[in-house]
Image (tube, rainbow, N blue to C red):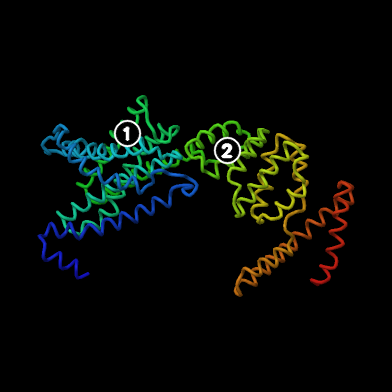
């Protein structure tokens, strides 16, 4: 702390404020980058050649580029004799010029690196580029107006710059999503045209400060609503969205396009494999499932099971149903429930195979006794009572299921194998019920 006070009283006032503001502004920028990084959907599944940190570092070049543009840019200012003239100056000479400087750096990185793995990524990359501009700008403002301005600028003004970048990042992502961010001559005019409306919004915010900070906050709120709407729109066109199985052909087409630029995506390959199963293209489904099967985690076991099912669908003689049963038993209860939920949809186009596979899985879920020992080991002393209540509910559900099967048995609706299984289950349950009593 003494270093800051020493700098403040030994340097000139402007130089001292600038030097002291640098660590503050960059710490705030690091926090903003962390927030952006956390909000990127499926970020761990994407192989990004350039992330928000890269766009921030290149975005630091926007300030010298802005100074160059301000020299070559024609001077269209008018005397600020009225509110309209004041707004004109801030829209033409500030808003559009600043957004142009940020956009040029953003466009260069996007076109060269091609980091767009999903359309909504463009919103975050544009915001990161604008964050760099706002960070350096905050340093200059602290030098002229003092460190006190950082409290407002680090939050309100920085968020405003990021929202402006998110808007033209949204447009860029919308026109270049099929090329992972690379643009061509036909789409370039649409991408650069986004600077004009965003620059107008920027100029309106600067003009609104004439009426006080409240008016500026209102403009920022409207801008944030536009950003959220743009982001939600891009999510509806993301390859990570879940397609209904009746649109499996469309899903395979879009997932294949996304995998050209993101071949390391485990999620996209698994989903494409499920849609291939619905289309009865089992060889392609097996290829997708085996692409990331090498591993020891539970996710690898689930992919191994799906690969076995695809091979079993192609030729019953190549896979023993007992092997499928063993792999299924090694999965976690959550994975078992997910398979029971998704497989009927994926195999709906092949009803005999669906019934055969579900017959293999029938009755293979972990019994309540296994859940009892596992849950009691995991909970602490204060959760024992809650765990016992859950076990009672599980026993009641098991008893209700058994009674329903008994009613089906009396009506003769069960097959011979299901009858034998029910009789064995009833024989095992009688001593267990007596022991609990």
For residue 126, side relative to residue 206 (left or right): right
Can you give x and y, in whole percent of width and height, for residue 376 in the image?
Answer: 66, 69
The answer to which of marks 2 and 1 sits earlier in the sequence is 1
Can you give x and y, in whole percent of width and height, for residue 331 in the image?
Answer: 67, 54
* Nearer to me, 48 or 40: 48
Q: Which residue is mark 2?
A: 243
Q: Are marks 2 and 1 in contact (CB under 8 Å)?
A: no
Can you give x and y, in whole percent of width and height, for residue 350 in the image?
Answer: 73, 35
Q: Which residue is mark 1?
A: 194
Alpha-carbon distance for marks 2 and 1?
A: 30 Å
Q: Residue at x 18, y 51 (%)?
A: 140
For residue 74, side relative to residue 193 (left or right): left
Dot 2: element:
loop
Dot 1: element:
loop
Q: Residue at x 30, y 58 (%)?
A: 27
* Nearer to me, 353 or 291: 291
Can you give x and y, in whole percent of width and height, for residue 14 in the image?
Answer: 12, 57
């Amino acid at each position: 702390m003494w270093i800051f006070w020493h700098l403040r009283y030994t340097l000139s006032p402007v130089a001292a404020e600038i030097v002291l503001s640098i660590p503050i502004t960059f710490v705030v920028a690091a926090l903003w980058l962390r927030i952006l990084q956390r909000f990127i959907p499926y970020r761990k599944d994407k192989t990004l050649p350039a992330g928000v940190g890269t766009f921030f570092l290149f975005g630091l070049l926007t300030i010298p580029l802005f100074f160059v543009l301000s020299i070559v840019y024609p001077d269209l200012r008018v005397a600020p004799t009225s509110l309209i003239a004041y707004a004109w100056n801030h829209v033409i000479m500030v808003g559009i010029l600043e957004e142009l400087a940020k956009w040029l750096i953003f466009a260069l990185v996007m076109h060269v690196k091609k980091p767009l793995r999903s359309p909504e990524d463009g919103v975050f990359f544009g915001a990161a580029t604008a964050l760099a501009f706002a960070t350096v700008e905050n340093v200059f403002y602290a030098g002229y107006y003092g460190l006190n301005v950082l409290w407002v600028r680090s939050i309100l003004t920085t968020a405003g710059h990021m929202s402006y970048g998110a808007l033209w990042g949204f447009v860029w992502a919308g026109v270049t999503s099929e090329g992972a961010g690379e643009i061509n001559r036909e789409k370039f005019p649409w991408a650069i045209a986004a600077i004009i409306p965003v620059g107008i919004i920027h100029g309106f915010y600067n003009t609104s400060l004439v009426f006080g900070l409240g008016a500026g906050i209102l403009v920022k709120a409207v801008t944030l609503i536009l950003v959220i709407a743009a982001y939600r729109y891009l999510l509806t066109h993301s390859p990570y969205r879940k397609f209904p199985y009746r649109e499996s052909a469309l899903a395979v087409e879009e997932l294949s396009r996304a995998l050209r630029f993101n071949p390391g995506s485990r999620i996209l390959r698994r989903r494409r494999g499920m849609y291939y199963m619905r289309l009865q293209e089992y060889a392609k489904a097996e290829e997708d499932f085996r692409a990331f099967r090498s591993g020891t985690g539970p996710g690898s076991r689930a992919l191994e099971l799906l690969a076995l099912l695809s091979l079993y669908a192609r030729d019953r003689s190549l896979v023993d149903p007992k092997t499928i049963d063993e792999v299924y038993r090694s999965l976690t209860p959550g994975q078992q429930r997910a398979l029971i939920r998704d497989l009927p949809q994926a195999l709906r186009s092949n009803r005999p195979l669906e019934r055969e596979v579900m017959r293999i899985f029938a009755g293979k879920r972990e019994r309540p006794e296994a859940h009892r020992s596992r849950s009691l080991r995991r909970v602490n002393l204060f959760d024992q009572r809650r765990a016992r209540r859950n076990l009672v509910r599980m026993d009641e559900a098991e008893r209700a299921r058994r009674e329903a099967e008994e009613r089906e048995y009396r009506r003769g609706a069960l097959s011979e194998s299901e009858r034998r299984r029910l009789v064995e289950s009833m024989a095992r349950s009688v001593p267990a019920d007596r022991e609990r009593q």
